[in-house]
Amino acid sequence: MSPAKNVGAPPELERAVKAQTAPEEMARIHFFHGVYDSPAMIFGPMSNKQPADLIANGTVQGGINKGQVLVIDLDPQEYDFSWGERVGDGHGLVSNKLTIRLMPGDLIYLRADIRPSMGAAFGIVGALADPPRAILVRCAPEECASQIGALQIVVAN
């Protein structure tokens, strides 16, 4: 896996993100790792630590590595968001599209989850019938915002 190339947030943005304040005329997106989970996992979900890119309307907005949260401000409009597992110069798994209409002052929290293949236990046919999936999840602020304090806040290049 190739790590995402990004830079740390300036102090004023870091303070605003931790205080959960949004820019007045833009929408703020927070993108971070979610879980690697399957009903067959005996020990419960694990953290997804794959380098990941956030994609909006087909364009990569930036990426995250383990222990990071990507924060970007976008113009208010409708976006199709997805995330891609960073592999070399491209993407391995790419998630579902999640359409969100952004409004000025919105704080949006997006999480990159992975569901491993259940079918792989049944060989190549099973793996083809049930391939692993990347899933983009929109989190409620009370569920996800509290996680940001422990992460390095990064911005896109």
Image (cartoon, helix red, strand yellow):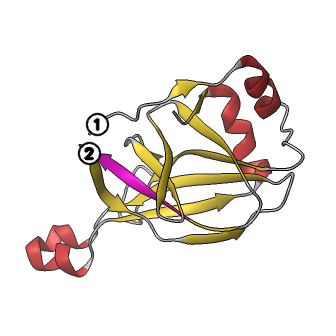
Residue 14 seen in the figure = yes
Residue 26 horizontal/vertical position (percent) = 80, 50
Label 2 residue SS: loop
Q: In the image, is 56 to the left or to the right of 89? A: right
Residue range highlighted in magenta: 81-89
Residues at marks 1 and 2, CA–CA distance in whole angstroms: 8 Å
Residue 64 horizontal/vertical position (percent) = 48, 38
Q: Label 1 belongs to which residue?
A: 2
Residue 150 horizontal/vertical position (percent) = 64, 26
Label 1 residue SS: loop
Crowding at dot 1, Cα within 10 Å, few <14 / some 14-19 / many 20+, comes out as some
Please name the amino acid that badge 2 sits on: Asp
Query: Which residue is found at the position 48% from the left and 30% from the top?
Result: 6
User: Where's the N terminus, which quadrant?
Assistant: top left
Q: Nearer the viewer, residue 97 or 122?
A: 97
Q: Label 2 belongs to which residue?
A: 89
Q: Is residue 100 above or below residue 29?
A: below
Does the magenta-highlighted stretch encompass residue 87?
A: yes
